[in-house]
């Protein structure tokens, strides 16, 4: 964060005459351990700790102001920025800070593939100038302002991920970030329990348009029936991408899965035809690459440079990370899961070159009333994916196991991480491949920790 005057940063949060002596702010933090002279400390009430308990100490340690939801003993009124919602305060300051800078910015949302598309867009742009991106899961009303506050005078591009679980959230994020280009990857069923239908999810994702300027490109998935049917605002210019349909602005043809990624022919109605190779498995990642390509080229970047950048793309965390361990290929995809991403992962895995295919699948969370049906459908998909053996973990995944077993798949349901690891350790051999996927809350990486450790022990 570069220095910014308190009056500019706090505009809209305090009356015009609140700041009597202009000061420069060097940091906005919600962590009392990070407090230093020249910062603003934002107090958040939490389950374990209440930031308000640290507000007075923050001033002692040099904070110029503290944001509090209510008056706090030991915090003088002239140092307290009263705001009943700390998230709102962060969003206002993030928007004010962002308005001081003019990078070319891409906003990324969608039910599936947001983070991978963000990473690919970053890879596509990074060769053209200094670029920042959302790190980790900082895609909400606390994390996104933190990302915006990483902008500097030298920043030429920024890729901002926007997540949501309720209507109205993307609207607030987009109005604060004000991207130059928007991407909607697809419309799935994540958070359908909160939004009621995929049509409503589509409307919520389209709120990104509320932050886009007149004539801005909006990159959309031509293969998604909900996006195709959506009524788009007149002020945006749709740029459609497709995995097959040449009527789209950009499409992929001759798609091939190789041992270390995907290759395809990209046809762009504006720029021409290119051969592309990306170090990521599955057709769904081809779609993500097309979205990133569309955003970068419509910002004015040269297509060849964009494609070169895509070839250097790197996954983050345990998102379809390929690990070679003692002759076994493990595809770690245990960062998140929903019916759409499970379907895509199994489709990729079915084409994966190996001796035998094993899958460890866990619960997909936050599906509401759809949960039972979705986990049973996952069992049917597993049975169609040429699996040699399926191991399941989690209460909901029991339904997956029952359906897969009924359809002839060799299936084991594990009641804990140890059982899951043993089921794999006792059966997997060199030359086999293992797909591991579940919602983040299932923490399937704990199974992998045992699996890797005991593979190593066995070898030693």
Image (cartoon, grey):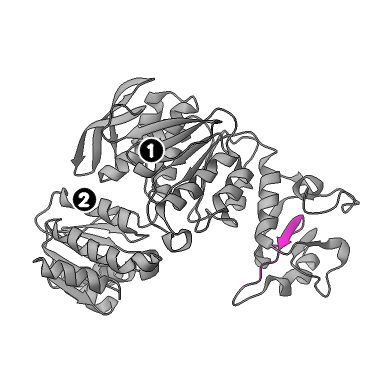
Q: Position of residue 175 (x, y in %)?
A: 62, 44
Q: Where is residue 14 in the image (x, y as percent from the top left)?
A: 82, 54
User: For the image shown, how many numbered marks are present on the structure?
Assistant: 2
Q: Position of residue 307 (x, y in %)?
A: 36, 30
Q: Residue at left 43%, top 64%?
A: 193
- In three-dimensional space, the C-alpha distance between marks 2 and 1, rounded to whole angstroms, equals 23 Å
Q: Please tell me whether residue 418 belongs to the stretch shown in magenta.
A: no
* Residue hosting label 1: 228
Residue 425 falls in image quadrant: bottom left
Q: Dot 1: what SS? A: helix
Residue 261 seen in the current view: yes
* Residue hosting label 2: 347
Residue 227 falls in image quadrant: top left
Residue 335 falls in image quadrant: bottom left
Mark 1, other Cα within 10 Å: few <14 / some 14–19 / many ≥20: few
Foreground residue among 141 and 153? 141
Q: Please tell me whether residue 42 belongs to the stretch shown in magenta.
A: yes
Foreground residue among 294 and 55? 294
Side of 217 where 410 appears, left or right: left
The secondary structure making up most of the magenta span is loop
From this view, report whether residue 364 is shown above or below residue 296. Answer: below
Mark 2, other Cα within 10 Å: few <14 / some 14–19 / many ≥20: some
Q: Dot 2: what SS? A: helix
The tag earlier along the polypeptide, 2 or 1, is 1
Side of 172 where 369 appears, left or right: left
Please identify the quadrant where the C terminus is shown.
Answer: bottom left
Region of the chain picked out in magenta, as a range: 35-45
Residue 127 seen in the current view: no
Closer to the eye: label 2 or 1 = 1
């Amino acid at each position: 964060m570069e220095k910014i005057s308190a009056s500019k940063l706090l505009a809209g949060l305090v009356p015009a005459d609140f700041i009597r002596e202009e000061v420069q702010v060097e940091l906005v933090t919600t962590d009392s351990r990070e407090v230093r002279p020249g910062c603003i400390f934002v107090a958040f009430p939490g389950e374990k700790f209440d930031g308000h308990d640290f507000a007075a100490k923050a001033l002692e340690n040099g904070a110029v102001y503290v944001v509090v939801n209510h008056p706090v003993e030991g915090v003088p009124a002239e140092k307290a920025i009263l705001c009943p919602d700390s998230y709102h305060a962060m969003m206002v300051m993030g928007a004010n800070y962002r308005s001081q800078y003019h990078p070319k910015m891409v906003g990324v949302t969608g039910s599936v593939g947001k983070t991978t598309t963000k990473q690919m867009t970053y890879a596509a742009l990074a060769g053209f100038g200094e670029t920042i991106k959302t790190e980790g899961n900082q895609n909400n009303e606390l994390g996104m302002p933190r990302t915006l506050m990483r902008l500097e005078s030298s920043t030429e591009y920024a890729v901002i991920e926007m997540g949501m679980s309720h209507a109205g959230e993307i609207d607030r994020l987009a109005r604060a970030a004000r991207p130059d280009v928007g991407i909607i990857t697809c419309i799935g069923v994540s958070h359908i329990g909160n939004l009621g239908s995929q049509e409503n999810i589509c409307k919520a994702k389209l709120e990104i348009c509320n932050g886009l300027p007149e004539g801005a490109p909006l990159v959309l998935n031509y293969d998604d029936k909900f996006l195709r049917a959506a009524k788009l605002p007149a002020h945006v210019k749709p740029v459609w991408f497709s995995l097959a349909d040449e009527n789209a602005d950009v499409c992929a043809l001759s798609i091939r899965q190789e041992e270390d990624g995907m290759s395809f022919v990209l046809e762009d109605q504006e720029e021409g035809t290119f051969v592309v190779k990306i170090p990521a498995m599955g057709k769904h990642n081809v779609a993500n690459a097309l979205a990133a390509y569309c955003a970068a080229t419509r910002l004015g970047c040269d297509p060849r440079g964009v494609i070169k950048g895509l070839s250097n793309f790197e996954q983050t965390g345990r998102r379809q990370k390929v690990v070679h361990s003692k002759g076994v290929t493990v595809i770690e995809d245990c960062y998140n899961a929903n019916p759409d991403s499970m379907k895509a992962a199994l489709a990729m895995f079915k084409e994966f070159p190996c001796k035998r295919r094993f899958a460890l699948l866990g619960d997909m969370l936050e599906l509401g009333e759809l949960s039972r049906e979705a986990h049973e459908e996952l069992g049917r998909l597993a049975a169609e994916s040429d699996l040699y053996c399926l191991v399941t973990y989690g209460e909901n995944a029991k339904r997956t196991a029952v359906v897969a077993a009924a359809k002839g798949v060799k299936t084991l349901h594990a009641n804990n991480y140890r059982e899951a690891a043993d089921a794999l350790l006792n059966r997997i051999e060199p030359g086999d491949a293992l797909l591991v996927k579940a919602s983040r809350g299932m923490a399937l990486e704990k199974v992998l920790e045992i699996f890797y450790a005991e593979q190593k022990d066995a070898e030693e």
